[in-house]
Amino acid sequence: MKKVNYSFELFKPNLIVFLICLVFFCILLSFVLISMSNNTTYLNYKFISFISKYVDNHLLEIQKYSQELGLHPTNIRLKNETKTIKEYDEQIYTLFDQLKSAKLVNKNIKKIVLFYPSSDLVVSDIGVYPIDSY
């Protein structure tokens, strides 16, 4: 006579229900993980795109300012100067004020220094100096 394990027979329907629930839970969990992964990838792409546009806009702003500074009449005059400047005129201080205000307006600019080797002059956002004292 074959010995029957009644406890296993009683446990068998519960085990089948448990396994069905476990399979369903695994399918649901994999769906949630894939969905979260896709969502995270999408959000990362959007964030990188936002940062890229932000940095590009600030770099474009700095580039426009540098082009504007290159066309400034005092800057052109000082670049073409051939002798050392002993007396600083009002135009040089106007250029200094413009550099100082540009630094205050744009927080990405840490320091602006213009060096004119032919006239031994430095104009920066902190002042106008002969090259020897800078």
Image (cartoon, rainbow, N blue to C red):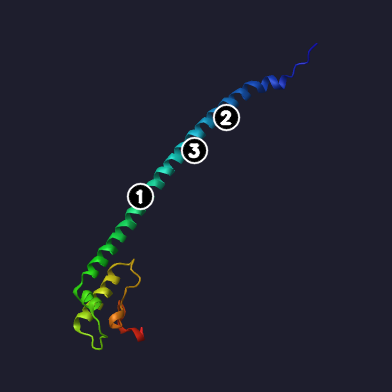
Q: Earlier in the sequence, mark 2 or mark 3?
A: 2
- Provide the residue designation for mark 1: 49
Kind of residue at disc 2: Leu
Residue at 43% across, 39% down: 38
Q: Quadrant of residue 101?
A: bottom left
Is label 3 in a helix, a strand or a loop?
Answer: helix
Is label 2 in a helix, a strand or a loop?
Answer: helix
Disc 2 and disc 3 in contact, CB within 8 angstroms: no
Task: Select label 1 or label 3 by which is in front.
Answer: 1
Residue at 23% across, 77% down: 80
- Provide the residue designation for mark 3: 33
Figure quadrant of the N terminus: top right
Kind of residue at disc 3: Leu
Q: Label 1, label 2: how many angstroms apart (C-alpha)?
A: 40 Å
Q: Quadrant of residue 133?
A: bottom left
Kind of residue at disc 1: Ser
Q: Nearer the viewer, residue 5 or 96?
A: 96
Disc 1 and disc 3 in contact, CB within 8 angstroms: no
Figure quadrant of the C terminus: bottom left
Badge 3 crowding class, 10 Å Cα cut-off, few under 14, some 14 to 19, many 20 or more, is: few
Q: Answer above or below: position of 27 versus 102.
A: above
Q: Nearer the viewer, residue 58 or 14?
A: 58
Q: Label 1, label 3: how many angstroms apart (C-alpha)?
A: 24 Å
- Provide the residue designation for mark 2: 22
Q: Earlier in the sequence, mark 1 or mark 3?
A: 3
Q: Which mark is residue 8?
A: none
